[in-house]
């Protein structure tokens, strides 16, 4: 039977239909708010970018952000959208003020898509513009205009207010996480000194730009004071950690956090290595110079070209106008300013060289062990099949698929078997641990290569040299919801905190949430993730439903497991509180402070006792 292909197969979608049918093209992955890359944060960012552009153009020094449950409201005090074009600006594709570079020379959003995407993907969207003593409002539902109000006189300050509620038809069971929103807003003020952002009453402000960013994010001891250099269109800050093993970079273009780097970050890394080699007159290995580096770079480019609508990776090779290429521009700046700084600050230059020499010694000491470990990792992964890989990877997919790539770290054959059978083989991989991993608190990096489980896990993730090489965007710990499972989870988190804390800092590590209970009658089955959901399900399903308590992942059939790692997957992000350093955290939970830990456990002990449960 042949498939017919006629004129009837050719469809023309309007802008709303296209965005709603293919949201990934505009905002990357959807998600539920558990990841900082999820769509609801992209919606927030798209509106904020317009307010930031107003500040950059010299209009409005304060932005107010409120999030109440699912509704977001953003108010700036910029120039306000021209009232006669306000509705068009938020609802007609390829309509906006940023095509005229005289008005927005170095704007983040240049194609007039962002606000329209927010409008189309929101069940409620309201825009209000105030300028020249007049105001106008319009209300939309899923991109369709519901009501447009006439202009009226007002005495309130000029600017724009946009409110929206992400559409639950697109974003199911979503929740805004304060930690992710705060991080985004802090980045905005670091990049725009003098800008004040108020978020649910909390104020964010920065005077020292990227220097403040590093100071606020560095927990460990550093080798020398932060080097902070800036000029028109570029700013950098850098130092080295005394204890970290990896490289940490924060990169930005025109105020956009380019989490996947791009041409500017590559040029910055190259420039730092070249300048340091020239300054000391030694041909240091690049890995020795960059090991433990903590740095940030922000540049401004005329009409930047990003590799996706979500703007997480810069593709531009030119700065725009009469300026040179991105690579030349950054190399020239770093060469001139970093070289001058080191000459003027000999004590810092000495501390930097001491750190590089230390990294060189450690690399050479580990060289033999690393070679043997790599060979062992290749053999074991080939023959023992600890890693059941997926077909797509973080480094070679289109943008929306990069964000979906996931590896589940689990323990035991039964659990890994259930996930392997149920997973999406295109984007989901499984790594199976054998027994409980070692408590690596206080141990050196040498143990990673000598311990088979750690060595193979490091090889599977491809993070030995840099987090940039991470093969999966989401690293998910999937263990049983019992004492042993919790212990394994804690040991894996300890491993990452000890040797790869940036994996957690950059929002890649999660805990898989699987249901604790199944409540069902003859007509319906409910999966419940906590006691409240169980009680509600029992009440709503009527008398005497069957209640099952799940104990281990291996006891959940693959058919059922598919429900828990598919589009409705529930992930709990592993986050680090600013109130506690990594050292304090690990010392308390993994150190030898047994009495203190016992007291903590007793005070927080929850006892489950329900004789009516069938335990699976």
Image (cartoon, rainbow, N blue to C red):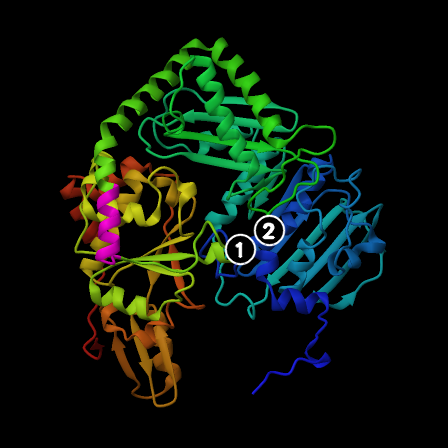
**Quarter of the figure with residue 374:** top left
Q: Does the stretch in magenta take in 166?
A: no
Going 52% across and 59% down the picture, which residue do you hit?
29
Residue under label 1: 398
Residue 604 can be seen in this image: no
Q: Is residue 214 above or below residue 432?
A: above
Is residue 574 in view? yes
Decide if residue 465 is on the left or right side of residue 338: left
Estimate the x, y position of residue 583 in percent, counting from the top left.
Answer: 28, 35
Name the magenta segment's main secondary structure: helix
Q: Tell me where residue 226 sits by quadrant.
A: top left
- Which residue matches tag 2? 308
Residues drawn in magenta: 374-386
User: Which label is found at residue 320?
Assistant: none
* Marks 1 and 2 in Cβ contact (< 8 Å): yes
Q: Nearer the viewer, residue 212 or 422?
A: 422
Q: Residue at x 56, y 29 (%)?
A: 209
Identify which residue, 392 or 70, lies in the foreground: 392
For the residue labelled by badge 2, is the local secondary structure a helix, a strand or a loop? Answer: loop
How many neighbours does mark 2 have within 10 angstroms: few (below 14), some (14-19), or many (20 or more)? some
């Amino acid at each position: 039977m042949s498939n017919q292909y006629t004129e009837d197969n050719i469809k023309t979608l309007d802008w709303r239909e296209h965005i709603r049918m293919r949201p990934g093209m505009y905002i990357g992955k959807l998600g539920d708010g558990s990841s900082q890359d999820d769509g609801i944060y992209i919606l927030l960012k798209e509106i904020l970018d317009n307010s930031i552009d107003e500040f950059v153009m010299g209009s409005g020094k304060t932005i107010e952000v409120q999030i109440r449950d699912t509704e977001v409201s953003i108010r700036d005090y910029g120039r306000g959208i021209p009232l006669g074009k306000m509705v068009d600006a938020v609802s007609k594709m390829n309509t906006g003020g940023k095509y005229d570079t005289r008005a927005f020379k170095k704007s983040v959003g240049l194609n007039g898509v962002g606000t329209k995407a927010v409008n189309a993907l929101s069940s409620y969207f309201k825009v209000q513009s105030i300028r020249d003593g007049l105001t106008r409002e319009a209300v939309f539902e899923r991109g369709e205009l519901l009501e447009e109000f006439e202009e009226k006189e007002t005495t309130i300050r000029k600017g724009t207010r946009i409110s929206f509620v992400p559409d639950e038809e697109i974003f199911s069971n979503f929740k805004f996480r304060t930690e992710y929103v705060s991080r985004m807003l802090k980045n905005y003020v670091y990049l725009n000194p003098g800008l004040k952002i108020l978020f649910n009453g909390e104020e964010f402000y920065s005077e020292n730009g990227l220097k403040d960013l590093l100071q606020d994010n560095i927990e460990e001891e550093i080798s020398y004071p932060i080097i902070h250099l800036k000029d028109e269109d570029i700013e950098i800050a850098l130092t080295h950690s005394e204890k970290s093993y990896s490289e940490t970079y924060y990169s930005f273009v025109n105020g956009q956090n380019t989490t996947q780097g791009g041409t500017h970050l590559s040029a910055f890394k190259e420039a730092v290595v070249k300048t340091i080699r020239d300054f000391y007159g030694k041909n240091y290995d690049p890995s020795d110079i960059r090991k433990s580096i903590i740095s940030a770079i922000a540049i401004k480019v005329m009409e930047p070209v990003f590799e996706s609508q979500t703007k997480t990776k810069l593709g531009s090779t030119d700065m725009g106008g009469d300026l040179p290429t991105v690579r030349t521009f950054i190399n020239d700046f770093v060469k001139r300013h970093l070289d001058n700084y080191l000459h003027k600050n000999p004590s810092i230059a000495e501390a930097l060289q001491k750190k590089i020499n230390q990294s060189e010694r450690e690399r050479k000491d580990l060289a033999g062990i690393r070679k043997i470990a790599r060979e062992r990792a290749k053999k074991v992964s080939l023959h023992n099949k600890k890693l059941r890989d997926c077909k797509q990877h973080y480094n070679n997919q289109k943008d929306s698929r990069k964000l979906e790539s996931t590896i589940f770290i689990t323990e035991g054959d039964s659990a890994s078997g259930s996930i392997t059978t149920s997973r999406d083989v295109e984007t989901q991989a499984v790594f199976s641990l054998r027994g409980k991993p070692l408590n690596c608190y206080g141990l050196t990096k040498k143990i990673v290569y000598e311990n088979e489980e750690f060595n193979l896990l490091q090889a599977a993730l491809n993070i030995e040299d840099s987090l940039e090489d991470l093969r999966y965007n989401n690293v998910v710990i999937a263990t049983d919801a019992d004492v042993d499972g919790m212990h394994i989870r804690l040991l894996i988190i300890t491993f990452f905190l000890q040797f790869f804390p940036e994996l957690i800092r950059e929002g890649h590590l999660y805990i898989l949430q699987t249901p604790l209970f199944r409540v069902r009658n003859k007509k319906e089955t409910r999966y419940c993730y906590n006691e409240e959901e169980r009680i509600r399900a029992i009440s709503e399903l009527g008398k005497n439903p069957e209640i099952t308590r799940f104990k281990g992942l291996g006891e959940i059939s693959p058919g059922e497991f598919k429900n828990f790692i598919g589009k409705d997957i529930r992930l709990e992000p592993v986050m680090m509180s600013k109130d506690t350093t990594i050292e304090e955290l690990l010392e308390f939970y993994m150190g030898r402070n047994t009495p203190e830990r016992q007291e903590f456990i007793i005070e927080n002990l929850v006892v489950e006792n329900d004789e009516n449960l069938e335990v699976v």
